Amino acid sequence: MTERRRRWRMVLGAPADEPLGAVEGRDQAMDAALAALYDTDRAGEPSPRSAGLGGSAPRVARWLGDIREHFPSTVVQVMQADAIERLDLTRLLLEPEMLAAVEPDVHLVGTLLSLNRVMPATAVATARQVVRTVVEQVESRVAQRMRTAVTGALNRAARTGRPRSADVDWDRTIRANLRHYLPEHRTVVPERLVGYARRTTAVQRDVVLCVDQSGSMASSVVFAGVFAAVLASIRSLRTSLVVFDTAVVDLTEQLGDPVDVLFGTQLGGGTDIGRALGYAQQLITRPRDSILVLISDLYEGGPREEMLRRVAALTGAGVQVVVLLALSDEGAPAYDRENAAALAALGVPAFACTPDAFPDLMAAAIERRDLQTFAGTTTSATA
């Protein structure tokens, strides 16, 4: 069988055996794994050409092992997500043998977090290990970039025109004084020194992450929890994390361990953004040195006027307010366009942001750069 025929046969499944030829060897095992998932109806009932996964945890665990053997991890993650959606396998994720067989990823963590209130004690330890594995993957991807971007922005924000000799930024000083270059002496005579103020352990900025934990925000909750823990490790910041649905939960005390943070969330339920912003206002004691990041799709279940009034009060007091419609790799989500437009009218940009862009976003906020411009050049801008 040629490679092209082989690929078409794998795509089309067993009904293509007659025109394209039957699969053999390793392809046969791969085809069986694909058929078990994709040759079923939405209720999980097998079609005439497949046995399906059925409702047995051991059978599903074997299938999970098979796909990990035959497909790369990126494909495995897609197939797992499809299996959870198409075959309603969420209840089986409460069983330890199932959790031990899955390929950890952000979407799986979101599913586990939505189940953590009903998870049996026998599965909790395994679930926490799955979550910790994903947290470590995310941290290795973004933590150092976050620390570098934020500390650099704090240093730039503390720039002074009268630095001590040890604090002179010679590169910036030379560029700022090039018009005073003396060709005969081949040197620059600086009229103005540029440098950094003495570094201090004092808190320079307050950061409040206010995260919508409705079910549609699952991936954003995972990334936000990890980022909050990283920000909390930077001594020059005072970081608070608030998650909300119709109630508000302050998880700041758990920021020492992002796994504890994530298990402190409860995905699902309604949304009351105004109430969450009201709580966040109480945490802000020096508005002009504060950044509030609201992560929400803006589908407000509470009074819309209250939400807008809170945002207006925060920005009027000098707080740098940022609204992220998503903090994930999926791009712009479904969101309330009317509320996004109303926030834009208040001078608050609302846009989706990838995890890789979030460190640069925080640096821009610390330096009080134009975030609408940042949104247009770096992320998926909306309103």
Image (spheres, rainbow, N blue to C red):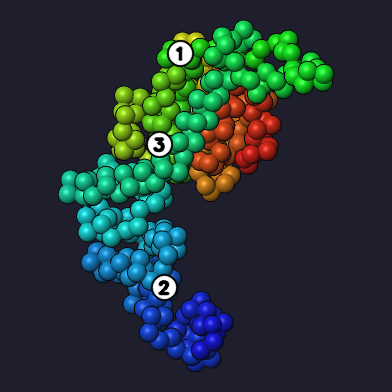
Answer with the quarter of the image where residue 345 lies. top right
The percent coordinates of residue 46 (x first, y second) are 37, 74
* 21 lies above or below 276: below
Q: Which mark is residue 5?
A: none
Residues at marks 3 and 1, CA–CA distance in whole angstroms: 25 Å
Q: Viewer-nearest of labels 3 and 1?
A: 1
CB atoms of marks 3 and 2 within 8 Å: no
Q: Of the residues shown, which amino acid type is indicated by label 3?
A: Val
Answer with the quarter of the image where residue 41 lies. bottom left
Q: Viewer-nearest of labels 3 and 2?
A: 3
User: Tag 2 or tag 3, which sits nearer the N-term?
Assistant: 2
Judging by the rendered image, the residue that carries numbered circle 1 is: 200
Q: Residue furthest top?
A: 162
Identified at 43% across, 34% down, the residue is 227
Judging by the rendered image, the residue that carries numbered circle 2 is: 34
Residues at marks 1 and 2, CA–CA distance in whole angstroms: 58 Å
Judging by the rendered image, the residue that carries numbered circle 3 is: 226
The percent coordinates of residue 357 (x first, y second) are 56, 38
Quadrant of the snapshot with the C terminus: top right
User: Tag 1 or tag 3, which sits nearer the N-term?
Assistant: 1
Identified at 56% across, 9% down, the residue is 164
> In what element is the residue under mark 3?
helix
> In what element is the residue under mark 1?
loop
> In what element is the residue under mark 2?
helix
Mark 2, residues whose alpha carbon is within 10 Å: few (<14), some, or many (≥20)?
Answer: some
Q: Residue furthest left?
A: 122
* 293 lies above or below 269: above
The percent coordinates of residue 66 (x first, y second) are 33, 70
The percent coordinates of residue 240 (x first, y second) are 41, 23
Q: Of the residues shown, which amino acid type is indicated by label 2?
A: Leu
* 12 lies above or below 246: below
Q: Of the residues shown, which amino acid type is indicated by label 1?
A: Thr
